[in-house]
Image (spheres, rainbow, N blue to C red):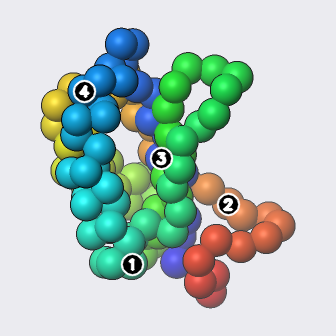
């Protein structure tokens, strides 16, 4: 299993829209977790622009999987409604610790 970090930065002044869409966003995340894709997620707190970190499992490493994960994340209501200023998908090579079931 390969692991990927997906970071979101939210559009400025999008808090009200995000609050309105939060139930659909959480349903989307729950479906990713139930499907074995989402290992962890949460807000990025103070110290920068508002955003989130999602840790996603992929079958294999590489650019093709990054593209697949980006397409998967397009299903997030926050993305569909234009609430993301940016989204980055990067392969994450864990050196210490673990997230999910490492093989």
* Earlier-in-chain disc, 1 versus 4: 4
Q: Is residue 88 above or below residue 10?
A: below
Horizontally, residue 16 falls left or right of residue 45, namely left
- C-alpha span from label 4 to label 2: 34 Å
* Earlier-in-chain disc, 4 versus 3: 3
Q: Secondary structure at mark 1?
A: loop
- C-alpha span from label 1 to label 4: 28 Å
Q: Secondary structure at mark 4?
A: helix
Name the mark on residue 17: 4
Q: Position of residue 79 (x, y in %)?
A: 24, 36
Q: Secondary structure at mark 2?
A: loop
* Earlier-in-chain disc, 3 versus 1: 3
- C-alpha span from label 2 to label 1: 19 Å
For the C terminus, the image quarter is bottom right
User: Would residue 61 be seen by someone viewing this image from the given angle?
Assistant: no
- Identify the residue under disc 2: 93
Q: At 36% from the left edge and 13% from the top edge, which residue is drawn?
A: 13
Q: Mark 4 and mark 2 in contact? Answer it, CB < 8 Å.
A: no
* Earlier-in-chain disc, 2 versus 3: 3
Q: Position of residue 32 (x, y in %)?
A: 32, 67
- Of 81 and 98, the residue lying toward us: 81
- Identify the residue under disc 1: 36
- Identify the residue under disc 3: 6
Labels 2, 1: front one: 1
Q: Secondary structure at mark 3?
A: strand
Q: At 29% from the left edge and 24% from the top edge, which residue is drawn?
A: 16
- Of 85 and 22, the residue lying toward us: 22
Q: At 31% from the left edge and 34% from the top edge, which residue is drawn?
A: 19
Which residue ends up furthest to the right in the rendered image?
A: 96
Name the mark on residue 45: none
């Amino acid at each position: 299993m390969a692991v990927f970090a997906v970071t979101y930065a939210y559009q400025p002044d999008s808090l009200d829209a995000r609050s309105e869409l939060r139930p659909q966003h959480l349903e989307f995340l729950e479906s990713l977790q139930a499907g074995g894709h989402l290992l962890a997620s949460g807000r990025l707190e103070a110290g920068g622009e508002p955003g989130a970190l999602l840790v996603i499992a992929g079958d294999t490493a590489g650019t093709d999987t990054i593209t697949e994960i980006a397409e998967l994340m397009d299903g997030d209501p926050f993305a569909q409604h234009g609430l993301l200023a940016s989204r980055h998908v990067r392969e994450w090579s864990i050196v210490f610790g673990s997230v999910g079931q490492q093989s």
